[in-house]
């Protein structure tokens, strides 16, 4: 199961859909990033993750 498939299952579940999902990948592929965000991911982080990425994410989710 890919991260995208897991994201779809979480967002389709009535019990899990409110859980924020953040996708992390080393692949900077714009259409994949857009697809994940359109399917409900809170954010998409590119590896290696920088401290500024984590700070930005924390401020958005709180």
Image: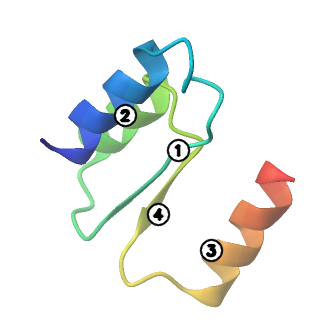
**Could you tell me how far apart the alpha carbons at marks 2 and 3 are, in whole angstroms?**
20 Å
| Percent of width and height locating residue 36 | 38, 35
Q: In the figure, residue 59 lies in which quadrant?
A: bottom right
Asked which secondary structure carries label 4, the reply is: strand
Tag of residue 21: 1
Residue 4 rendering spot, x and y as whole percentages:
26, 37
In this rendering, the answer to whether 27 lies above or below 36 is below
Earlier in the chain: of badge 4 and badge 2, it is: 2
Q: Secondary structure at mark 2?
A: helix
Q: Distance of mark 4 from mark 2, alpha carbons?
A: 14 Å
**As drawn, 22 above or below 41:** below
Residue highlighted by disc 2: 7
Q: Nearer the viewer, mark 1 or mark 3?
A: 1
Q: Which residue is mark 4?
A: 45
Residue drawn 27% across the image and 60% down it? 28
Between disc 2 and disc 3, whose residue precedes?
2
Residues at marks 3 and 4 touching, judged by CB atoms closer than 8 Å = yes
Report the disc number at residue 53: 3
**Viewed as shown, does residue 31 lie left or right of 41?**
left
Horizontal placement of 54 versus 13: left or right? right
């Amino acid at each position: 199961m890919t991260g995208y498939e897991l994201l779809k299952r979480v967002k389709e579940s009535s019990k899990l859909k409110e859980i924020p999902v953040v996708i992390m990948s080393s692949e900077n592929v714009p259409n994949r990033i857009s697809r994940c965000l359109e399917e409900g991911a809170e954010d998409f982080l590119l590896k290696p993750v920088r401290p500024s990425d984590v700070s930005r994410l924390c401020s958005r989710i709180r």
